[in-house]
Image (spheres, grey):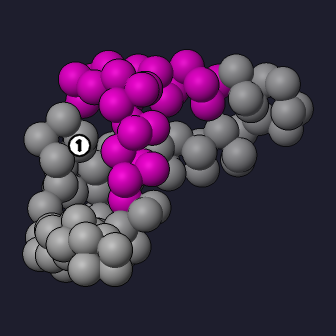
Amino acid sequence: MTRLLCFFFMPIFVLMACNDENKVPENLIQPAKMAEILENLHLAEAYVNSNFQYSDTSKFVYKRLEDSILKAQGTQLAVFDSSMRFYQINVKLLDKVYALTVDSLSLKEALSK
């Protein structure tokens, strides 16, 4: 019985071990585009936080900005949410995406001075 279980589960473990950690499924947002979207979302959040003090207004404005950012990037909220879940599970990839995001934001800040 244990041999049968080993033969059944061994291919699953091999496939899991061989999984390329740096590969993002094609139906999700790729790292460079995800970094660009996150950059724009963080800028939108900063704008809303500095210009709208009421919670309801700031939520409404941020949602509108989020929708327009995703539309401009040619993606939908469901795809963005699925992509974020994928990156949250794959922390090394999320770290790379945020490294790109921070670098881009730092460059924008340096150029604006």
Q: Position of residue 61 (x, y in %)?
A: 65, 24
Q: Residues within 10 Å of mark 1 (few under 14, many from 20)?
A: many
What residue is shown at x 85% (from left), y 33% (from top)? 55
What is the residue that sits farthest to the right in this orientation?
54
* 84 part of magenta stretch: yes
Q: Nearer the viewer, residue 67 or 86?
A: 86
What secondary structure is the magenta-colored segment mainly? helix
Count of number-bearing discs: 1
Q: Position of residue 101 (x, y in %)?
A: 33, 64
Task: Tell me the residue that label 1 is attached to.
Answer: 29
Instruction: Using the rendered image of the protein, determine whether residue 102 is visible from the camera's viewpoint.
Output: no
Q: Position of residue 113 (x, y in %)?
A: 37, 69
Q: Nearer the viewer, residue 7 or 52?
A: 7
Q: Nearer the viewer, residue 9 or 53?
A: 9
Boundaries of the magenta span: 61-87
Q: Dividing the picture into quarters, in which one does residue 13 lie?
A: bottom left
What residue is shown at x 46% (from left), y 21% (from top)? 67
Relative to 59, is 95 above or below?
Answer: below
Label 1 secondary element: loop
Relative to 36, is 11 above or below?
Answer: below
